[in-house]
Image (spheres, rainbow, N blue to C red):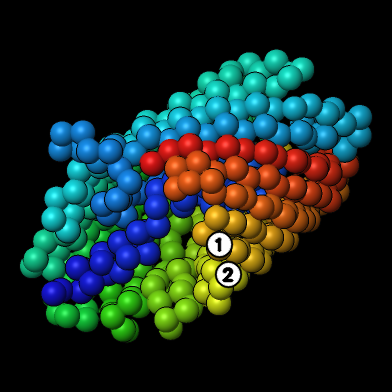
């Protein structure tokens, strides 16, 4: 068996958790992670895309050649500051209903999938401009016996409150008007020996926001290539060089030409099992960002520096696990005349899954630093973001789960960007 098949088998082994049971844990994780940082994403998926199938599910419904996995999630929240304001907070309740229709076609070691998820969100008092969000995902993984593996995905999103789909770093924390996001990616690995291989990857992102004062439209093209080395049967190291061409579109209010950039990144990455109970996935490296400034543009500085984005998890006894994540990376900014901000953060999560009972405790601290001062106060902005969460769930059957959680988040920044929010959540998940 070649290395690509070993890795795919390892991924599938981790994904053999029952579909609904896994989704219930993901829902709880989202509710705990953060208000604007995570909970405003797709509620049932914190990563910003539909869960990629990890193989055949024993609970899926067979429909012709397809494995059909339907899911329904109903969520109620009480939020004491729905507009994330520093004073005069407005309290309201949020009702959310989300379905997911996932179809998969397994083809030996390969598979293709399609997922559609409509989501309806409504406040008890406040009237949202757009109550419906839609998520379309299609993709596949194709593993060949000669060592070649090809993976492709396409995501189409019509959303509003899912701010992390617009700004992954967390500068944007509220937005009611709709946006449309397209994302496509393709990658190929080729293992020319049992332990060594090469890879290439390409991705395209296009964002169209209906309210450019919240965030401008942009298009991003990324490409990379590198070397793969299998350190053990379940652990792979990669060295990657990547380029990103970021195009910030002009708005009716300002020119964003100074935010256009070209970045180069060199990273060392690891993914897989460090030991039978310790797993990791992450990259560490160096990035440079060059801005194409013209006379009269804001005095934006190029970025050059260390970056890291990783997660390490320790599976402990009796169904418990401890995860630690770390982040240090620049992100595009829409604040004043800044072209980027640098996010530095770390989080610790304790998870428990005892079959019928599952729970999670989560804490995270992140700092977003800006280069240019506020145009009104001339103060330099720095956001200190603390989030703490606790939740518990119960599985009545393999197809029905109930969970509840509490989340506290505090953002300490310039006055008009500061807020404190407390969120209580109750959710019900029914699915296969």
The answer to which of 282 and 232 lies nearer the viewer is: 232
Q: Residue at x 47, y 50 (%)?
A: 21
How packed is label 1: few (under 14 Cα within 10 Å), some, or many (20 or more)?
Answer: some
Residue 58 appears in the picture as rendered:
yes
Instruction: Give the image location of residue 18, x and y in percent.
Output: 39, 52
Q: Residue at x 34, y 39 (%)?
A: 69
Asked if residue 36 is positioned above or below residue 120 in the image, the reply reads below
The residue tagged 2 is 320
Q: Residue at x 76, y 33 (%)?
A: 78
Q: Report whether 67 appears left or right of 242.
A: left
Q: Report whether 426 appears left or right of 200.
A: right
- Give the residue furthest to the left: 146
Instruction: State which quadrant residue 274 falls in.
Output: bottom left
Report, in whole angstroms, how far the alpha carbon at label 2 lies from the one at label 1: 6 Å
Judged from the image, the secondary structure of the residue bearing numbered disc 1 is strand
The answer to which of 253 and 237 lies nearer the viewer is: 237
Q: Who comes first in sequence, dot 2 or dot 1?
A: 2
Instruction: Give the image location of residue 149, x and y in percent.
Output: 19, 60
The answer to which of 342 and 348 lies nearer the viewer is: 348
Q: Quadrant of the C terminus?
A: top left
Q: Are marks 2 and 1 in contact (CB under 8 Å)?
A: yes
Which mark is drawn over residue 353?
Answer: 1
Which mark is drawn over residue 339?
Answer: none
Instruction: Give the image location of residue 259, x and y in percent.
Output: 56, 43
- Give the residue furthest to the right: 88
Q: Report whether 297 appears left or right of 179.
A: right
Q: Residue at x 78, y 49 (%)?
A: 408
Q: Quadrant of the N terminus?
A: bottom left
Instruction: Give the image location of residue 354, x and y in percent.
Output: 55, 63
Q: Report whether 327 appears left or right of 11.
A: right
Residue 185 appears in the picture as rendered:
no
């Amino acid at each position: 068996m070649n290395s690509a098949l070993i890795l795919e088998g390892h991924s599938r082994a981790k994904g053999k958790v029952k579909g609904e049971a896994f989704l219930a844990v993901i829902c709880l994780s989202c509710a705990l992670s953060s208000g604007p940082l995570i909970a405003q994403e797709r509620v049932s998926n914190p990563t910003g895309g539909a869960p990629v199938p990890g193989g055949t599910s024993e609970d899926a419904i067979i429909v012709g050649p397809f494995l059909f996995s339907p899911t329904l999630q109903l969520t109620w929240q009480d939020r004491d500051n729905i507009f994330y304001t520093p004073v005069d907070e407005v309290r309201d309740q949020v009702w959310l209903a989300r379905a997911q229709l996932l179809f998969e076609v397994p083809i030996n070691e390969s598979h293709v999938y399609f997922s559609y998820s409509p989501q309806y969100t409504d406040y008890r008092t406040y009237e949202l401009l757009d109550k419906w969000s839609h998520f379309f995902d299609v993709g596949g993984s194709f593993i060949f016996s000669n060592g070649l593996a090809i993976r492709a995905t396409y995501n189409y999103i019509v959303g509003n409150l899912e701010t992390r789909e617009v700004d992954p770093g967390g500068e944007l924390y509220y937005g009611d008007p709709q946006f449309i996001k397209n994302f496509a990616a393709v990658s190929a690995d080729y293992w020319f020996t049992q332990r060594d291989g090469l890879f290439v990857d390409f991705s395209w992102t296009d964002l169209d926001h209906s309210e450019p004062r919240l965030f401008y439209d942009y298009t991003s093209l990324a490409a990379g290539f590198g070397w793969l080395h299998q350190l053990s049967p379940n652990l792979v190291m990669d060295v990657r060089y990547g380029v990103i061409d970021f195009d910030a579109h002009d708005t009716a209010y300002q020119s964003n030409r100074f935010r256009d950039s070209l970045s180069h990144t060199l990273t060392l990455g690891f993914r897989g099992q460090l030991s039978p109970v310790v797993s990791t996935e992450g990259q560490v490296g160096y990035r440079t960002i060059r801005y194409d400034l013209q006379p009269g543009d804001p005095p934006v500085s190029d970025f050059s520096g260390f970056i890291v984005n990783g997660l390490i998890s320790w599976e402990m006894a009796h169904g418990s696990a401890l995860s630690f994540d770390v982040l240090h990376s620049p992100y595009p900014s829409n604040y004043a005349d800044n072209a980027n901000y640098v996010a530095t953060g770390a989080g610790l999560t304790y998870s428990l899954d005892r079959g019928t009972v599952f729970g999670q405790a989560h804490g995270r601290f992140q700092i977003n630093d800006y280069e240019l001062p506020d145009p009104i106060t001339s103060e330099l902005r720095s956001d200190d973001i603390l989030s703490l969460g606790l939740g518990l769930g119960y599985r009545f059957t393999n197809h029905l789960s109930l969970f509840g959680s509490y989340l506290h988040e505090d953002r300490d920044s310039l006055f008009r960007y500061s807020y404190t929010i407390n969120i209580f959540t109750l959710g019900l998940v029914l699915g296969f």
